[in-house]
Amino acid sequence: SHTFHFTENKRILSFQYYYEKGECWRRIEPYKLVFKWSSWYLWGYCLEREAFRLFRLNRMENVTSGPERFTARPLPLEDLDAGSRMAEGTILLRAWFDKREACRLVEEYGAGCYLESGGRLLFERNFMSDSHMRQWILSFGTSVEVIEPETLRNELRQIGKDFLKKYGGT
Protein backbone atom coordinates (compact mmCIF):
# COMPACT_ATOMS: atom_id res chain seq x y z
CA SER A 1 0.00 0.00 0.00
CA HIS A 2 1.05 3.60 -0.61
CA THR A 3 0.38 6.48 1.79
CA PHE A 4 0.56 10.24 1.22
CA HIS A 5 0.22 12.72 4.09
CA PHE A 6 -1.57 16.01 3.47
CA THR A 7 -2.25 17.83 6.70
CA GLU A 8 -0.38 21.06 5.91
CA ASN A 9 -3.55 22.88 4.84
CA LYS A 10 -5.48 21.67 7.94
CA ARG A 11 -8.90 22.56 6.50
CA ILE A 12 -12.01 20.53 7.22
CA LEU A 13 -13.44 18.71 4.19
CA SER A 14 -17.16 18.25 3.61
CA PHE A 15 -18.59 15.75 1.13
CA GLN A 16 -21.49 13.51 0.24
CA TYR A 17 -20.54 9.86 0.86
CA TYR A 18 -22.12 6.75 -0.69
CA TYR A 19 -22.02 3.48 1.23
CA GLU A 20 -23.92 0.18 1.46
CA LYS A 21 -26.84 1.68 3.44
CA GLY A 22 -27.28 4.75 1.26
CA GLU A 23 -25.63 8.14 1.35
CA CYS A 24 -24.79 10.81 3.91
CA TRP A 25 -22.88 14.04 4.40
CA ARG A 26 -19.57 13.87 6.22
CA ARG A 27 -17.17 16.45 7.64
CA ILE A 28 -13.66 15.21 8.30
CA GLU A 29 -10.19 16.30 9.26
CA PRO A 30 -8.12 14.79 6.41
CA TYR A 31 -4.80 13.17 7.31
CA LYS A 32 -3.68 10.67 4.69
CA LEU A 33 -4.36 9.51 1.18
CA VAL A 34 -3.92 5.73 1.15
CA PHE A 35 -3.80 3.21 -1.70
CA LYS A 36 -4.71 -0.31 -0.62
CA TRP A 37 -7.06 -3.13 -1.55
CA SER A 38 -6.80 -1.85 -5.16
CA SER A 39 -8.44 1.53 -4.37
CA TRP A 40 -7.61 4.99 -3.06
CA TYR A 41 -8.93 6.01 0.37
CA LEU A 42 -8.88 9.17 2.41
CA TRP A 43 -8.08 8.49 6.06
CA GLY A 44 -9.32 11.14 8.42
CA TYR A 45 -11.10 11.98 11.63
CA CYS A 46 -14.88 11.92 11.05
CA LEU A 47 -16.54 14.71 13.03
CA GLU A 48 -19.94 12.96 12.87
CA ARG A 49 -18.67 9.59 14.13
CA GLU A 50 -15.97 11.10 16.36
CA ALA A 51 -13.47 8.49 15.18
CA PHE A 52 -10.82 7.89 12.52
CA ARG A 53 -12.30 6.36 9.37
CA LEU A 54 -11.31 5.36 5.84
CA PHE A 55 -13.36 6.90 3.01
CA ARG A 56 -13.10 5.41 -0.45
CA LEU A 57 -12.38 8.25 -2.89
CA ASN A 58 -14.70 7.09 -5.66
CA ARG A 59 -17.63 7.14 -3.19
CA MET A 60 -17.08 10.82 -2.33
CA GLU A 61 -19.04 13.54 -4.19
CA ASN A 62 -19.21 17.32 -3.94
CA VAL A 63 -16.01 17.59 -1.91
CA THR A 64 -15.43 21.08 -0.54
CA SER A 65 -12.76 22.58 1.66
CA GLY A 66 -14.10 25.53 3.62
CA PRO A 67 -12.32 28.14 5.71
CA GLU A 68 -12.71 26.10 8.93
CA ARG A 69 -9.33 24.82 10.16
CA PHE A 70 -8.46 22.05 12.61
CA THR A 71 -5.62 21.26 14.96
CA ALA A 72 -3.93 17.98 14.03
CA ARG A 73 -4.72 15.09 16.38
CA PRO A 74 -2.27 12.40 17.44
CA LEU A 75 -2.61 9.68 14.80
CA PRO A 76 -3.51 6.15 15.96
CA LEU A 77 -1.43 4.49 13.24
CA GLU A 78 -2.00 1.06 14.71
CA ASP A 79 -5.69 1.37 13.74
CA LEU A 80 -4.78 1.93 10.10
CA ASP A 81 -2.29 -0.95 10.17
CA ALA A 82 -4.81 -3.23 11.89
CA GLY A 83 -7.32 -2.44 9.16
CA SER A 84 -4.75 -3.42 6.55
CA ARG A 85 -4.06 -6.74 8.21
CA MET A 86 -7.74 -7.47 8.65
CA ALA A 87 -8.47 -6.63 5.02
CA GLU A 88 -5.89 -9.13 3.83
CA GLY A 89 -8.28 -11.94 4.72
CA THR A 90 -7.68 -15.62 5.31
CA ILE A 91 -8.96 -17.25 2.09
CA LEU A 92 -5.98 -18.05 -0.13
CA LEU A 93 -6.41 -17.67 -3.88
CA ARG A 94 -3.80 -19.20 -6.18
CA ALA A 95 -4.36 -18.69 -9.88
CA TRP A 96 -2.67 -18.56 -13.28
CA PHE A 97 -3.32 -15.41 -15.30
CA ASP A 98 -2.66 -14.74 -18.97
CA LYS A 99 0.32 -12.45 -19.43
CA ARG A 100 -1.91 -9.72 -20.90
CA GLU A 101 -3.43 -9.22 -17.41
CA ALA A 102 -0.10 -8.08 -15.91
CA CYS A 103 -1.01 -4.38 -16.09
CA ARG A 104 -4.31 -4.87 -14.29
CA LEU A 105 -2.75 -7.06 -11.58
CA VAL A 106 -0.05 -4.45 -10.93
CA GLU A 107 -2.65 -1.65 -10.98
CA GLU A 108 -4.76 -3.42 -8.38
CA TYR A 109 -2.11 -5.09 -6.19
CA GLY A 110 1.21 -3.43 -6.97
CA ALA A 111 4.43 -4.46 -8.67
CA GLY A 112 5.69 -7.84 -7.58
CA CYS A 113 2.22 -9.26 -6.94
CA TYR A 114 2.82 -12.21 -9.29
CA LEU A 115 5.58 -14.55 -10.49
CA GLU A 116 6.07 -15.12 -14.20
CA SER A 117 6.49 -18.72 -15.30
CA GLY A 118 6.06 -20.37 -18.69
CA GLY A 119 4.42 -17.31 -20.24
CA ARG A 120 1.79 -17.12 -17.48
CA LEU A 121 1.52 -15.19 -14.23
CA LEU A 122 1.17 -17.00 -10.91
CA PHE A 123 -0.83 -14.88 -8.48
CA GLU A 124 -1.33 -15.66 -4.77
CA ARG A 125 -3.40 -13.48 -2.46
CA ASN A 126 -5.57 -13.78 0.62
CA PHE A 127 -9.15 -12.53 0.33
CA MET A 128 -11.66 -11.59 3.02
CA SER A 129 -14.70 -13.26 1.47
CA ASP A 130 -15.55 -15.96 -1.03
CA SER A 131 -18.01 -13.66 -2.80
CA HIS A 132 -15.47 -10.86 -3.31
CA MET A 133 -12.90 -13.35 -4.58
CA ARG A 134 -15.44 -14.97 -6.94
CA GLN A 135 -16.59 -11.62 -8.40
CA TRP A 136 -13.02 -10.48 -8.91
CA ILE A 137 -11.99 -13.72 -10.64
CA LEU A 138 -15.08 -13.69 -12.88
CA SER A 139 -14.20 -10.16 -14.03
CA PHE A 140 -11.17 -11.68 -15.85
CA GLY A 141 -13.28 -14.05 -17.96
CA THR A 142 -11.18 -16.82 -19.47
CA SER A 143 -7.87 -15.02 -18.78
CA VAL A 144 -7.52 -16.81 -15.46
CA GLU A 145 -7.34 -20.39 -14.21
CA VAL A 146 -7.91 -20.90 -10.50
CA ILE A 147 -5.60 -23.42 -8.83
CA GLU A 148 -7.13 -23.11 -5.38
CA PRO A 149 -9.37 -22.98 -3.46
CA GLU A 150 -11.00 -26.09 -4.86
CA THR A 151 -14.41 -24.77 -3.82
CA LEU A 152 -13.96 -21.81 -6.19
CA ARG A 153 -12.86 -24.12 -9.02
CA ASN A 154 -16.08 -26.10 -8.51
CA GLU A 155 -18.20 -22.92 -8.45
CA LEU A 156 -16.62 -21.71 -11.69
CA ARG A 157 -17.24 -25.10 -13.30
CA GLN A 158 -20.93 -24.87 -12.33
CA ILE A 159 -21.17 -21.26 -13.54
CA GLY A 160 -19.75 -22.42 -16.89
CA LYS A 161 -22.40 -25.15 -17.11
CA ASP A 162 -25.12 -22.62 -16.24
CA PHE A 163 -23.89 -20.29 -19.00
CA LEU A 164 -24.00 -23.16 -21.51
CA LYS A 165 -27.61 -23.93 -20.52
CA LYS A 166 -28.62 -20.30 -20.79
CA TYR A 167 -26.80 -19.47 -24.04
CA GLY A 168 -26.73 -22.85 -25.77
CA GLY A 169 -23.87 -25.00 -26.90
CA THR A 170 -22.30 -28.16 -25.60
Image: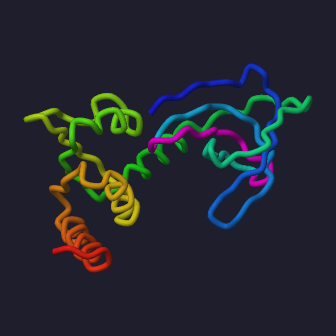
Q: Which residue lies at the image location 55% right of the left edge and 36% below the top edge?
A: 77
Count of numbered labels shown in the rendering: 0
Query: Could you tell whether 108 is left or right of 22 in the image?
Result: left
Query: Where's residue 150, x and y in %?
Result: 17, 66
Answer above or below: position of 167 versus 79: below
**Magenta stretch holds residue 44:** yes
Answer above or below: position of 102 versus 23: above
Q: Which residue lies at the image location 71% right of the left edge and 25% below the top edge?
A: 7
Furthest-right residue in view? 67
Furthest-top residue in view? 8
Query: Where's residue 112, x and y in %?
Result: 28, 30
**Overall secondary structure of the magenta stretch?**
strand
Q: In terms of depth relative to the viewer, which is nearer, 121 or 69? A: 121
Q: Which residue lies at the image location 29% right of the left edge and 73% below the top edge?
A: 163
Q: Which residues are magenta?
A: 37-49
Query: Could you tell whether 79 is left or right of 46 in the image?
Result: left
Give the position of the N terminus as an image quadrant.
Answer: top left
